[in-house]
Structures are given as C-alpha cells and as structure tokens.
Image (cartoon, rainbow, N blue to C red):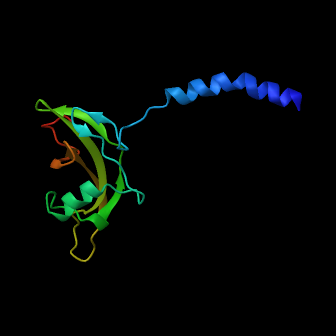
C-alpha cells in the first residue's frame, strides 16, 4: 500500500504538466486561421455547411445522398485568398455505350470554404488551380 502511494505521489507532477499543455479553444471546437474556423464534422460524419451548399445548387452535379465520403479539410491559398478545402467524393453517372446500362463512377471535388461559407467548388482534375 505504501509503495502504491509513493508511486502515485511521484507521478503527480508529471501528469499535472501534461494537463497544462492541452490546447483549449475558446467557445468553439475548431481552430481559427486566416480562412476562418476549420470546418468540423457533425456526429453523423457529415459537414452540414457543405450539405447546405449542395442543396442550394452551388455544385449542380451532385445531391447529398450521392456523397460517398468526405475528406479531411486542409488549407490552401487560391488567387491570394486563404481557404479551407474539403475533398468530397461522390457518385456520378459515367458515359456508357448503351442507354440501358448506366454505370457509376466515383468523382471528387473540393468545397472551398472561407469564414464558414462555401464560396465555390473545384473539380479535382482542374488545371487552373493546380489540384
């Protein structure tokens, strides 16, 4: 018993230093940057901000039920302005030789977010932005 108490008392300064190093975000669950707050997934693994943009018709090719997977947001400077880019993989109709068979492919686009607003979308293989 005495040994356990001694070990617990010796490890107390170590654990108190670990607790002091943990980052805290004042009132938000995201990290601030030049592009605004980092987009955060909700509990259903979706970005509500991006889903709202799709429902408003900003990126006409897809609907929210066609989304396959969201990627992790990263920052990029495009034409002198900072953005959070979120990769969005979705199912798209592939051109086929027959009208009776329609195959689906997985396509990808980036949602460009600045200060909690989706400003525009970039298809993955766009040469203009170098993505």
Q: Quadrant of residue 28?
A: top left
The residue nearer to you, when weighing 70 against 130, is 70
Q: Is residue 7 left or right of residue 119?
A: right
The residue nearer to you, when weighing 104 against 1, is 1
Residue at position x 28%, y 73% from top?
A: 101
The image shows residue 64, relative to residue 34, as above or below, that is: below
Q: Quadrant of residue 106?
A: bottom left
Q: Residue furthest bottom?
A: 100
The image quadrant where one finds the N terminus is: top right
Residue at position x 38%, y 44% from top?
A: 29
The residue nearer to you, when weighing 52 against 67, is 52
Q: Is residue 3 left or right of residue 95?
A: right
Residue at position x 20%, y 38% from top?
A: 83
The total number of labels drawn is 0
The image shows residue 16, relative to residue 117, as above or below, that is: above
Q: Residue furthest right?
A: 1
Q: Quadrant of residue 11?
A: top right
Residue 99 is situated, as x and y percent measured from the top left of the image, at 21, 75
Q: Is residue 9 left or right of residue 31?
A: right
The residue nearer to you, when weighing 89 against 25, is 25
The image quadrant where one finds the C terminus is: top left
Residue 39 is situated, as x and y percent measured from the top left of the image, at 30, 46
Residue 105 is situated, as x and y percent measured from the top left of the image, at 30, 59
The image shows residue 56, relative to residue 113, as above or below, that is: below
Residue at position x 86%, y 27% from top?
A: 3
């Amino acid at each position: 018993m005495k040994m356990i108490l001694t070990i617990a008392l010796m490890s107390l300064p170590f654990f108190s230093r670990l607790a002091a190093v943990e980052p805290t975000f004042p009132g938000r669950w995201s990290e601030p940057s030049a592009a605004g707050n980092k987009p955060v997934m909700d509990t259903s693994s979706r970005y509500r901000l991006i889903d709202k943009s799709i429902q408003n018709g900003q990126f006409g090719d897809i609907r929210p039920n066609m989304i396959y997977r969201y990627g992790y947001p990263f920052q990029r400077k495009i034409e002198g302005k900072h953005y959070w880019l979120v990769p969005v993989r979705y199912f798209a109709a592939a051109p086929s030789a027959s009208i009776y068979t329609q195959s689906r492919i997985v396509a990808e686009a980036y949602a460009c977010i600045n200060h909690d607003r989706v400003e525009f979308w970039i298809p993955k293989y766009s040469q203009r932005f170098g993505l």
